Image (cartoon, rainbow, N blue to C red):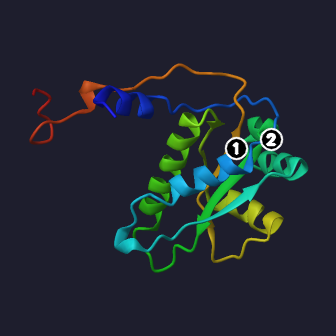
Amino acid sequence: MTEKEVLDFIFRRRSVRKFTGEPVPREKLEALLRAAMAAPSARNRQPWEFLVITEREKIREVCSAHPYAKFGVEAGAVILPLGRPAGNFYFFQDMAAAVENLLLAAANLGLGATWCGMDENRNKILRPLLGIPEDYWIFALIPVGIPAEHPAPRTQYDPRKVHWEKFGNRGA
């Protein structure tokens, strides 16, 4: 793969919030999970587990329960990365790496997806709805589907946010 192909692969990842409503083939969902589980993990703890929802009514129920995921009611699936953070200082870093891998894979498999963040209140609402134990943290809610919109690839590179050699040095 050339340098340009690698960067194109990364820049293709965009948040997609409009879906056709078609189901996502199980093989593609499993490919997303394989990509997520290929993420780096501190001490190789691999703290992640994934709840995959493909049942139409459950997708609507879960997306409607999250104030910023209502757009996902037409997604073909919802993936919730989750795990037990207790005693794992690097839990959130490991989970973020897994989610980013999943999102990159989705974009490059022709799927749309968006990372919807979670907090304690959203966890409290979704845990009982999905039968998730109290010691598990739902890290994200990710609607995945056949895209009905196709945002152009891009980067948001901003040289004003880059420091060279020491903080405050903006020159190369």
Question: Is there any visible trace of residue 68 in the rendered image?
Answer: no
Where does residue 8 sit, x and y in percent of width and height? 41, 27
Place residue 144 in its image quadrant. Answer: top right
Which residue is depicted at the point 11% across and 33% down?
A: 169
Q: Inspect the image, locate mark 2, and give the three-letter code of the amino acid beneath it.
A: Pro
Q: Dividing the image into 4 quarters, which one contains the N terminus? A: top left
The residue wearing badge 2 is 23
Left of 167 or right of it: where is 112? right
Does 142 appear above or below 129? above
Q: Which of 45 and 122 is in front in this view?
A: 45
Label 2, secondary structure: give it: loop
Where does residue 120 sit, x and y in percent of width and height? 63, 62
Q: Inspect the image, locate mark 1, and give the three-letter code of the amino acid beneath it.
A: Pro
How many marks do you count on the picture? Answer: 2
Which residue is depicted at the point 82% across and 64% down?
A: 129
Left of 66 or right of it: where is 2? left
Left of 127 or right of it: where is 55? right
Q: Which of marks 1 and 2 is nearer the N terminus?
A: 2
Number of other residues with Cα within 10 Å of mark 1, as a class: few under 14, some 14 to 19, many 20 or more = many
Q: Which of 71 and 146 is in front in this view?
A: 146
Q: Looking at the image, which residue sits at the far bottom?
A: 87
Which of discs 1 and 2 lies nearer the camera? The answer is 2
Label 1, secondary structure: give it: strand
The residue wearing badge 1 is 143
Q: Dividing the image into 4 quarters, which one contains the C terminus? A: top left
Question: Is there any visible trace of residue 169 in the rendered image?
Answer: yes
